[in-house]
Structure formats: C-alpha cells, structure tokens
Amino acid sequence: MIKNRKFSTSLFVGLCLLFQYLPIIVMVIFSFNSAKSLSNFKGFSFYWYEELFKNNELMSAVFVSVSIAIIATLVSTILGTITAIGLSKSKKIVRQIVLQLNQLPILNPEIVTAISLMLFFAAFKVDKGYMTMLFAHIAFCTPFVITNVLPKVRRLDPNLSDAAMDLGATPFQALTKVILPQIKPAIFTGALLAFTMSFDDFIISYFVTGNGVQNISIAVYNMSKRINPSINALSAIVVFVILGVLALSYIVPAIVKKKTTSKVRKRTARIVIALSCLALVIGIAVRESNKPVLRVFNWGEYVDKSVIKAFEKEYDCKVVYETFDSNESMYTKYTGGNKYDILVPSDYMIERLIKEERIQKLDWSLITNRDSLDTSIMNQPFDPNNEYWAPYFYGNVGIVYDKTKVDEADLGQGFEILRNQKYKGNIYMYDSVRDSFTVALKALGYSMNSDNDAEIQEAYQWLANQKETMAPVYGGDEIIDSMKNSEKAMAIMYSGDAAAIMAENENMDFYLPTEGTNVWFDGFVITNECQEVTLAHEFINYMISDENALLNTLEVGYLTSNKHASAIAKEEDFEGNSAYGIRTDLTGNDEVFTYQDNALKEKYAILWTKIISQ
C-alpha cells in the first residue's frame, strides 16, 4: 500500500513537471526548425539563431535587460538590506508604517504600478528611456529584498553588534563583519529574486521606457505580433544560460570552497561592482551629435527595417523607432508624457486625435509622392479632406477557410456560416469585442458602428447563441499558425494575416461576406509636439514612395496605399495567395470604424465580458 502511494505521488509529480516543462522543450526543439512555422517541424537548422544575432534590435534589448537587471539588483539589494537592518532597530509604530508602505508595490497589480510610475515621470517632465526604466526596476525590486531580509535580521541576537563595538569594532565593522555574514543567505535570496523580477518584467518596463529603449520582454512581445521564429531561438538561449548558471552554482562552490579566501571574495565583489558600473555608463552614455532626431511610434513588425536604415543614411539623421501593440496602448503612452513626432494610428484613433487637437495638419506640398497614393482610399469619413493623415496600409476583416473542409456553396450565407451546425467546434473567432460585434452586427444587417441599444442587444444575442451552439475557439495571433496547419475549418481573420496563411497552405482561401465588413486604414500623422516638422514630412514622403512602399508591403503582408506598389504586389500575388484582392469601395456595405465614446465603449465591453464568461 505504501509503495503504491509513493508510486502515485511520484507519477503525479512527474506529470506536473512534464506539464510545466513540455512547452519549454517544444520551444527549444522548434528553435532549430528550418521552416518559419511555429508548429510544423520541417528540418533541423541553425538559421533562426543566425537571424537572431543579425538582429541589432534584439541584441540591444538583451544588453538593456541584462545591464538593468544587474544594476537594479545591486542597488535594490543594498537599499533593501540597509532598510531591513534599520527597521529592526526602529520603534514598533515606525516599523509597522514602513512595512505597510513596503507591501503596496508587492500587492499592487503591476499595471497600477506601471501607470503610477509613468505619470510620475510625466509630471516631472523626465524623458523616458534607460534611466527611467532603471529607476522603476529599483523601485519595485527593493520591497522584495526588504521582505526577504527583515525576518532574518529580526532573528539575530541584538547584543552581538553591541558586543562587537565593546570589543573595539567601529559601527561599520560591526555591520560588515558581524551582522552581514549572518544574514548573507537572506541577502542572496533577495538579490536572486530582485534579478528575476527585473529581468523578466514587461508591464512596468513597457510604460516607463521611451526613446527606442526596450528590454527583451518588450522586444519579444512586439515580435510576437507576426510569426517570427527568432523568438524561439532567443528564448532557447535564455533557457540554456539559466541552466548553465544553475549548474555552475552547484559545481563552482564545491571546487573552490577550500581555496576561497576573504581576499578572493572581496576581489570578486569589486569585479561585479565594476562591471555593473561599466554597464550603467554604457547604458546611459549618449554621444553628442548634430544629427536631427525623428521619433516614430509604429505598430510592431510593421515595416521593413532596411527602409528605416536607408532613410537615416540618406537624410543624415537618427530615427528613434518604437512599437506598440494596439491603438489604446499607443494613446496611453503618448498622452502619458512620451514624446513622439510621428504616430501610425488606425482610422478611429486618428479621428480621436483630431478631435482632441493632438496632431497637426500635413503640408502636402512637402509630400511629393502624393500622386502615387490610391485616390480610392483617400478622403475617409474620419478625415474627409485628408488634412491630418497620409495612408500607409489598409485591409479588411473576412473569413479564412479550408477549401477541403468548407463547402463553398455555404459561403453564400455570409457571416451566418459561422452559425452553421456543419462546422460546430471547427471555428476560430477573434477574442476582440469590436471585431466580434462587427461580425454579429453585419450578419444582422446593421452598421458595425451602431449605437442603437436594440441593435446592440440583438448582436449580443447573436454572439451568445453562436457560443452556445457552435463552441467556437476565441484567440488572437496564435490563430495564424493554427490555420496554417488546418486545425479548424474557418477563422475570422485580417487580410494581411490571411496572406501569410495562404502563402504556406494552398488549401486556404479568403472570403469577404457580401453583407459588408470592416475596412480599416492605418496612416501617418504628425504630433503637435514635433520639433522636426520638415524631416517628419520627408519621412512620410519616403515611406509612401514606390520603391519603399513595395518593400514594406512585401515584408508586412498588408496592402500598401501606394497604387503602383499595390499593383505589383497583386501581380506577384504575394507568393501565390489571393488576399490582395481586397474590396475597398465604401459605397456599399463596407464600413470604417468610428471612434466610440467611453459610455458606448463600456456598453459593448460589458456585453462582451458576459459572452466570454458564459
């Protein structure tokens, strides 16, 4: 009986460990995949490791993560240890107040801490970048060190330091030779926790950084918006490094235990401190330059990086290029004090920025490539006279379907095919309130921008019924790779993502329901704070030129606003797919998103939460 229990316990632990580490193992395996797919292994290759080391942006992010983690760990460990020792000698009421304050950063959701720090830096008009990220990491790491060290300090005999000083030791000697050696394990644990918290932080770092400074978490998050197996290679290297450090932590102490002297320890500490100081100097060093700086805020994976480099070379300038993952996060960072010259928002966000007078009118006389723009996509409702924006990419939302699984005769049902019982459990829907309500409203014959209570409620019932009867799977960008492998019969999809799918799976096609769908536009706008207005116009003009527009559209997969580049992309059919056959006539049932006020947005959000939680 006892043996059976032990076996059951071991089996349970083994399954738990397998569940925990299997995704990491799969990730490491696919880092050696010769193909771009993240789920279909087609052969062994080091290609993505080579691409990783060629990516200067990622290498810079690695340096930022490591240097900030080391410096933040050292500073927070020193501050936390000194504070813990001081609290142990303080009056009870002082100690309780400080400890309660110390718990706030630990118990607070990270997003609250992130927004608070962002507003703090904005209030004092501090330019965000390496130093703001470093200070933020020190701020949230220090409480964890205090929490680890204080219990150990309070268990010490308070008479030890007094006895040491009675015997002739100075207060500093009593601290370093009596107290610190006894609490060393707690200090080491606190330092490890601080390093871990700093190295893998994303949310706080995302909101307190700027001027192109990003750590690994931010870089990987931006890369994940499009399929990029270099993420696997980077993650695999991190795993290998961690395993190496863990191995050394067991092997080295055993080898040098008898040989290590206090001089060696002191020398090692000095080397670590010196390297950390060097990292700090390199991290914050900025060469004086007369080159003008242009700050661009664009979507992640939304440009051919060679175009940016070519612009810098041709115009002898520096482009500080940052990325965002949604219009809302872009708006939050921009209005939170981050300084940008050019933004690339979507239609409804452009409308909001115009209403709030945050962007300036374009000087079209400086944009000589205007004649290359497709006039059919100009003069949209959010900017009827094209005074504020220059179009960049555009696309729509349709249905990607597997021709071997879907009867093409059923496509005549439009969006109602998503409630056809033949495809129950075989559908992907976007985990997005606005995109999903667009499907329902259009299926019912209403405007996707409806503010009518009865229509919104009817759309809610449509989506609720679909979830109950069709068991759809709600997802995000991971749907792209799943559909490449034909895991479902159909999925709601943006046209650019559909292009990537059809390029790799010949059985896939893209359908636009006749009842109309969302046609979206992303474009360049210039902020009111822009100091390099002429250079900003030159950048926009450069990006929409025939040559560069083609490079960007082939890299990103969405249709460019440049009619000449667009025609070439359609002729080449982008590696064999038909997603460039996009319908852009807004005289029919197709629509562009309009800006929703807070009350309407909340109404939709509440109903969407009910659907997801059912």
Image (tube, rainbow, N blue to C red):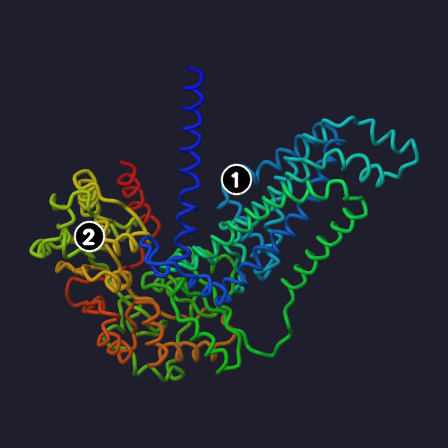
Mark number displayed over residue 321: none
Question: Residue 500 occupies which quadrant of the picture?
Answer: bottom left
- Circle 1: element type: loop
Instruction: Classify 98 as above or below 396.
Output: above
Q: Which residue is mark 1?
A: 108
The percent position of residue 326, horizontal first and vertical second, equals: 38, 57
**If the image is split into quadrants, where does the C terminus sit?**
top left
Q: Is 65 on the left or on the right of 513, as rendered?
A: right
Question: Residue 283 occupies which quadrant of the picture?
Answer: bottom right
What residue type is disc 1 on? Asn
Look at the image and tell me whether residue 250 can be seen.
yes
Q: Residue at x 50, y 44 (%)?
A: 110
Q: Which residue is mark 2?
A: 490
Q: Residue at x 27, y 73 (%)?
A: 379
Among the two numbered marks 2 and 1 on one chain, the one whose residue lies closer to the N terminus: 1
Total residue callouts: 2
Q: Around disc 1, counting alpha carbons within 10 Å, would you say few (fewer than 14), some (14 to 19), or many (20 or more)?
A: few
